[in-house]
Every structure is written in C-alpha cells, then in structure tokens.
Image (spheres, helix red, strand yellow):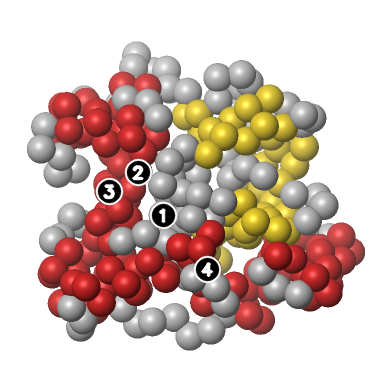
Amino acid sequence: MDSMTVSSESRPAPYRERRVADVAGTVWTGRHDAGSSTILPDGCMDLIWTGRRILVAGPDTRPYVHHADVAGEMVGLRLDPGVAPTVLGCAADELRDTRTDLADLWTRAEAQRWCSAIVDADDPASVLVALTRTRVADRPAWLGPVVANLAAGRRIDLCADVAGVTARTLHRQSLHHFGYGPKTLQRILRMRAAMTDLGVGRDLSAVAYRRGFADYPHMHREFVELAGHGPATFAVRAGHSGPEADQPRAQ
C-alpha cells in the first residue's frame, strides 16, 4: 500500500519505493517540500529516517498534517499491517495517530546506535531493513490471511474464523497488532482500494459499488471521515490526476 498525500501548498515531491518481501515491508525514499502535506491512513506503520532521528509513524485513523520549514529528504520502511509491533516490542494502539522517536520506545543508546549506523551507511534504507531483520519476532500466522480477508470485505466474524478465534479475541489482538479493531482496518483498506480505482479514472458510483459501499453517499462519508476530503478529490478526470500523490509519511 502506498502512502498517498494531499498537499494544498506545494507540488508533490519525487517518490520511489521497492518491496522487501522478507520483512513484509516497502522501502521508500522521497523529498518533501517546505510547507504542509497531509498523510492519509493506510493501515501500516513506518520506520522513518528524517536525517536526524528514527521516527515511528503509528497507525493513523485520520489525516496527519506534517509541517516542514524547509525542503528535505526522508527514507522509510513501511511495514505491512500488523508487522511493526513484532519489531518494536510495543502494542500498535499505544502509537495510534502519533509520530514517536524510536529513542522513546527503546533505550536511547540502542536507538542512537542505529542512527549512527544510518549516518555511516551509503544506503540508509538498508539499515532500516537490517534493524527490522534483527529485531523482528515471529509474526502470528493469522496476520496475513486476516488482512487479506478484511481487504476482501468479508464479515468480521468470518475473519475471526480464519484466525481460529472469537470475534472478541480478534478485536483484542487487532488493537495490539493494527492499532485499532478489525472493522476500522477494513474501512481504511476499502478506502485505499477505492482511491486506487479513482486514480485510474473509474466512475465515482462504479467505484462505490465495486468496493462494497452501500451507495455513493456512504463512500463520501467514509472518505470525509478517514481522508478529510470527499472521493471526488481523488478522481482522475480528462487525463489529469487529483491532488493526491505518492509521498513518504511525515515527520
């Protein structure tokens, strides 16, 4: 999943990413302009090198506005839904809607050791990947299948069956791994899938039907709550894209 950004104050900056399958994540690099940009929920958590520190971007439930005084470059590792807590050793719901210095989660000495390694590295992203490989614990076997089923729009009780637990237990485990309950993750994944459709020019009403919204007004309400804008903001019309763009999560 990409981290789409809406910015009303500057043009989107160049952005590149590549998948790193063995850590269930995506490395990204990008420059950000001075001004404000808005990072939208995507169900993921990121480790971000800002040039000064390693920042943990928690799972968002609403748009996150980043203000930069000057242009700069960031490098990050976006971990798939549910993966970051197995690396960080803390529950995702403790980091919901936050940006937290890694030194506040681990010892300052350990965080500084990784920061120093990034400064000395030719490829900062490789250090974030190495950090993840070193720290990652075994991921629950149900994570991937449950996320896939939530993304497919299956009922929560059926997703709990996939995990072999009750719906109540799935909700509790989801708070730890995703940062919120399975229904919230499902809403976010559905919105992101709809954004992808809108970004290639699909009709608004057709997208609402295709992605399982009750109707277009339902999709509009979901977008406004989760993304801060109605779906028309993200639609491509007459060969011109909307204001969204692929961008790193903000500091």
Mark 4 touches mark 1? (CB < 8 Å): no
Q: Nearer the viewer, residue 116 or 235?
A: 116
Q: Is residue 70 left or right of residue 206?
A: right
Mark 2 touches mark 1? (CB < 8 Å): yes
Q: Is label 4 in a helix, a strand or a loop?
A: helix
Image-quadrant location for residue 212: top left
**Numbered label tally:** 4
Identify residue for label 4.
84
x, y percent for residue 113: 83, 72
The amino acid on which the numbered mark 4 sits, given as a three-letter code, is Ala
The residue shown at (20%, 83%) is: 164
- The disc, 4 or 1, on the residue closer to the chain's N-terminal end is 1
Mark 4 touches mark 3? (CB < 8 Å): no
Q: Is label 1 in a helix, a strand or a loop?
A: loop
Identify residue for label 2.
192
The residue shown at (79%, 30%) is: 70
